[in-house]
Image: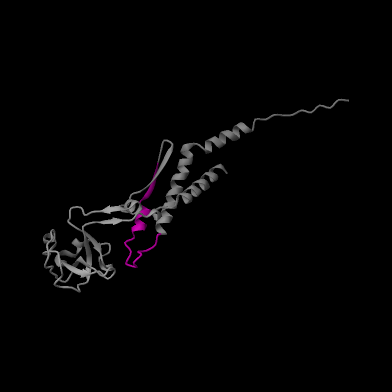
Amino acid sequence: MSVALTIEIRDEATPWLAELGRRCAPDRVGAALGPGITRLLQRHFIGRGANQRGWPSTHFWGRAAAATNWSQGAGHVTVGVNQVGVRQRYFGGPILPVNAQMLTIPACPEAYGKTAGEFGGELRVTMVTDPESGRLRLALARRRGTVTGGRGKGLKSLGGRRRGEASALGNEPLFWLARGVRQAPDPGVIPADDEIRAEMMRIVRGLLN
């Protein structure tokens, strides 16, 4: 008596590998990564919270979230934020006046998110003691102030006379004046690399599963 064992060979691997390759195609992976990483950045921006000083919000980070978008190219995906100021906050560096002699830095909630031009001609240059540093600083305030003594340049166009001691102090400043400032970089503007990688792996695993 003889026994025969027949083994049937079916090619089920090729269709499975073909489907796996289709799921891993760059265009399909990119189409999943683009919106996924965009949503990650949007959540991160919205989570940055309100103004650190407790001043009325200008909704900067909400606008940054709304301005976050993605595009797909050949073998790559680009996620961009079309909001002025995000790049400066991330990399830091000098900020210099453009078409003006000095920067105007908000000194109170009323001025935050506004420009000096919005207050019309009611602002005057004066010297005010900065409560944080205890030093005299050039400022724009509503109450008329004159600066006397010493030598200096660049105040005539701002409504002042010369740099030096102030003849009128105690004016509440709306804006501090500065020739320029250097902003420290803030890597926390965008999610950490590990967080981005983890979200990418989660998205890719979802495709493979």
Question: Residue placed farthest to the right in the image?
Answer: 1
* Relative to 33, residue 176 above or below: below
- Measured along the vertical axis of the image, is residue 30 above or below residue 90? above
Quadrant showing the N terminus = top right
- For this orientation, the residue located farthest to the top is 2
Taking depth in this image into account, of 88 and 14 the one nearest to the observer is 88
- Residue 95 at x, y percent in the picture: 26, 54
Number of numbered discs present?
Answer: 0
Q: Which residues are magenta?
A: 48-71
What residue appears at the point 27 percent right and 53 percent down from the top-left corner? 94
Residue beneath the point at 52% across and 44% down: 204
**Extreme residue in the bottom direction:** 170
Q: Relative to 117, is 39 above or below?
A: above
| Residue 5, quarter of picture | top right
User: In this rendering, would 53 be left or right of 191?
Assistant: left
For the C terminus, the image quarter is top right
User: Would residue 185 be found to the left or right of residue 161 on screen?
Assistant: right
**In magenta segment, residue 50:** yes
Based on the displayed image, in which of its 4 quarters is residue 130 positioned? Answer: bottom left
Q: Quadrant of residue 125?
A: bottom left
Q: Nearer the viewer, residue 194 or 15?
A: 194
Q: Inspect the magenta stretch and tell me whether residue 69 lies in it.
A: yes
The x and y percentages for residue 158 are 14, 61
Q: Position of residue 8 (x, y in %)?
A: 72, 29
The residue drawn where x is 42% and y is 49% is 38
Colour convention: one colour
Left or right, 34 with respect to 96, comes to right
Relative image position of residue 147 (x, y in whole percent): 13, 67
**Does 157 sit above or below residue 165?**
above
Residue pictured at 39% horizontal, 53% vertical:
187
